[in-house]
Amino acid sequence: MPRAPRRTHHAAPPREAVLAAAMATIAEHGLDGLTMAGLGREVGMSSGHLLYYFRTKDELLLQTLEWSENRLGAERRALLARPGTARERLDAYIDLYLPAGHRDPHWTLWLEVWGRSQNADDEARARQAAIEGAWHRDLVALLAEGTSRGEFRAVDADRYATRLRALLDGFSVHVTVGIPGAGRERVLVQTAEFLDEALTQGAD
């Protein structure tokens, strides 16, 4: 009697591959195009299998954001370690911070996670705060360096970083959702003007 064929077990794709596929789907189809069933087909997993790993779509979105932020964080640390003036590196920081344009996938995801955070648990909120905190700490350090070198006028680095990031967040929302007259290049010009007026004028 012939033996029954041995069942094969297909290993689930690495978590990073799933998150990369989720981000690619957002970039191509927007958030409405990201479904558990569709993502499962993309990576060769059932929607039930994905739910086993991520529990909810909210958790999938947050993990995708964390994955994307890890990549941006590495890029941010590299640019901040470059030689050059503090202002040059601040401009590079802002260039990285702002969305690439209308429907930027990273910022589209950020806005969705922010919106869902109203009902998030404390652990999810803490993870979001950790993302914000990394950007804030690097900006504070850069502002403090520029002040110590006399490139920037004397400011409270923490308070100024909070205000500057609030400005960048507002501009970023406008660029991402496509507010008329709020294109990326215009925002870069307006931000540079703000820094000239509020940070470098009067520096020693």
Image (cartoon, helix red, strand yellow):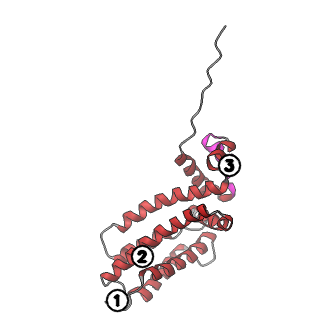
**Quick check: marks 2 and 3 in contact, CB under 8 Å?**
no
The amino acid at mark 2 is Val
Q: Residues within 10 Å of mark 3 (few under 14, many from 20)?
A: many
As helix, strand or loop, the secondary structure at mark 1 comes to loop
Foreground residue among 56 and 190: 56
Q: Residues within 10 Å of mark 2 (few under 14, many from 20)?
A: some
Q: Which mark is residue 203?
A: 1
Circle nearer the N terminus (1, 3): 3
In the rendered image, the quadrant that contains the N terminus is: top right
Q: Residue furthest bottom?
A: 202
Q: Which residues are magenta?
A: 32-45
> Residue visible at 63% across and 72% down?
178
Q: Is residue 197 above or below residue 100?
A: below
Query: What's the distance in space between the residues labelled 2 and 1, CA to CA?
Result: 17 Å
As helix, strand or loop, the secondary structure at mark 2 comes to helix
As helix, strand or loop, the secondary structure at mark 3 comes to helix
**Quick check: marks 1 and 3 in contact, CB under 8 Å?**
no
Q: Position of residue 167 (x, y in %)?
A: 53, 79
Circle nearer the N terminus (2, 1): 2
Q: Depth-wise, is mark 2 or mark 3 nearer the camera?
A: 2
The amino acid at mark 1 is Ala
Q: Reply yes or no: does residue 39 show up in magenta.
A: yes
Q: Report which residue position mark 3 lands on.
A: 36
Q: Reply yes or no: does residue 180 show up in magenta.
A: no
Q: Position of residue 12 (x, y in %)?
A: 58, 39
Q: Report which residue position mark 2 lands on.
A: 140
> Residue visible at 62% across and 50% down?
54
Magenta segment, principal secondary structure? Answer: helix
The amino acid at mark 3 is Met
